[in-house]
Amino acid sequence: MIAEIERDSGVELHIRTLPDDADVAINGRYVGRTPLTIRDLSPGTVRVTLSRSGYRTVERWVRLRDQSRVELDVVLEQQIGILSLVLEPPDAEVFIDGVRRTEEVLRLPIGDYTIYVTRFGYNDHRERITIRENRTTLRQITLKPAAFEVHNLSLSRSILNPLTPGAAGSAAVRFDVTAAGSATLMVRDAAGRPVYRDAIADFDQRRQRFSWDGRDASGLPVPSGDYTLQLRAHPTDHGEVITRTLSLTVDRTLPVAYRSTRSSSSGALLAPDVLALPRGVFQLHSAAAGGPLADGRSNGPLAPAHLGLRLGIGNGMEVAATADGFFSDSISDARLQGAASLRWVYAASQPEPASLYDSFMGALQASLVLGPTEAARVNPADATANWPSLRLGLPFGLHIRHFRAVLTPELVLSHTYPARIPRTPHAGQLLGWGYARAALIFDHAGFTAAASAALRSKPFTDGAAIAGPLYSALEVHQLVPQTPLALTLFVTSEARTGSDLRLSLGGGLGILY
């Protein structure tokens, strides 16, 4: 379609195509790609050539008159070919360039394609074909039956605590098979005695997955120790039995529990824990709250939203990363911050659950909090967030049955201190102050309850003094049985001088696996 619009002076040609990105040539000279506007042309008739890979080339003769703008719109016609497939077996799946197709006859734009044909019990077929315009490409593909094989036997974790509720207390066993058959799974202790047996009948797909929860045939948790998992796979034609084995350690003292991920680390809401997740175990924690505590100002509350990740990396080390957003009805009040921490447990001794003795635990923790540096935009409420700073903590705790008491002295270094007046002599300098954080944590059968508190000092430049207010929090977490899901409820408080008490209530959802 060609349209002409009058203009004050000169000649202008605007070209659009569907689809875009077509090459444009004027009188045989390349000038660019669509959409394209060409100015300072001379009046007269020009030959416009439009070309794009996979589409038919189009030529248009366009008359250009002085003091006019000509708009040329062209729909390009795709070059099409036919692919006809004949498959054996006929119910095999077909993927063309990674897209599953169910048609036996396909109209395709010209070009090169990869065909992948697959069906359980047969060898896969892959080939490269070329589709040409106005031609039918016929492909007859016969898959050959696959020999029975077992591949990629693996465990989701090599150390397991059967006393841990939810999905974190089991190990997923995964393997691939190439053809129909069945299998038996046997778990043996270090002396070779069988403690667990399971059967998998009638394979009907490649990927096989089941789990062992560290319990014996009667459903009781097996003792701590080394175990061997043996897989014996049988083809349906009664051919050769394939045997594969893996090693697994059961450790009933392995600490795996759901935790909050606030305070730029994991633990209770206001105090870090003194334990680390085992290697390969991770937790995702999300939460949101409402109430004036998130802001601490008189002009309206902020609603905080939180997302945290913690991961065990082995040797008593855990990393955590958190992101917090604080939102209100005013966009200008929105605040975002992120944080990361590393915890190293240098002393930890966990008793068996039936034991009554105590154990002392100690850790070192470093946290980095990033966010707005302006004093007017940082969040002054420690119950849900902190401000840009480097934090060094020394958590230590005492374990008594299902309870753990944790105390953490913490040093904070930052250029920002919200309670300071910007024009004080120390404004803008690197300030240091201290925290006292404490928590009492209860864990049993997938249920966690914690009470925590935090109190900060004034900057050391102001001498030894308590800054206040006192922050406290109560929280509960419940793992959903046989799943990786966890539910959270919590309440936080900010106690200032006099009778000024601010409360915030929230909840969350998480994954421990």
Image: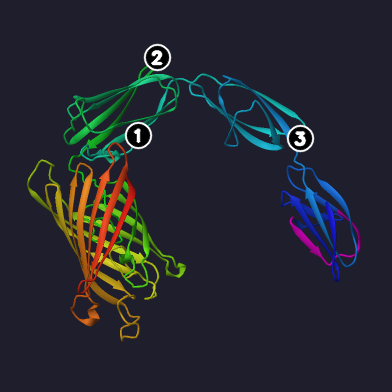
Does residue 71 lie above or below 372 as drawn? Answer: above
Residue found farthest to the front: 499
- Horizontal side of 267 relative to 85 (left or right) equals left
Kind of residue sitting beneath label 3? Glu
Separation of marks 2 and 1 at Cα, in angstroms: 24 Å
Q: Earlier in the sequence, mark 3 or mark 1?
A: 3
Q: Quadrant of residue 232?
A: top left
What residue is shown with label 2? 239
Along the line of sight, the residue nearer the viewer: 2 or 433: 2
Q: Nearer the viewer, mark 2 or mark 3?
A: 3
Q: Amino acid at mark 2?
A: Gly
Give the alpha-carbon distance from disc 3 to disc 1, as whole Å. 48 Å
Nearer the viewer's eye, disc 3 or disc 1?
Answer: 3
Residue at image mark 1: 154
Image x and y of residue 339, in percent? 35, 62
The local crowd at label 1, few if under 14, some if 14 to 19, many if 20 or more residues have their Cα within 10 Å, is: some
Find disc 3 in the rendering and name its residue: 133
In the rendering, at what x and y percent does residue 314 appear? Answer: 27, 49
Find residue 306 and report its horizontal and vertical position in percent: 36, 57
Q: Which residues are magenta?
A: 34-47
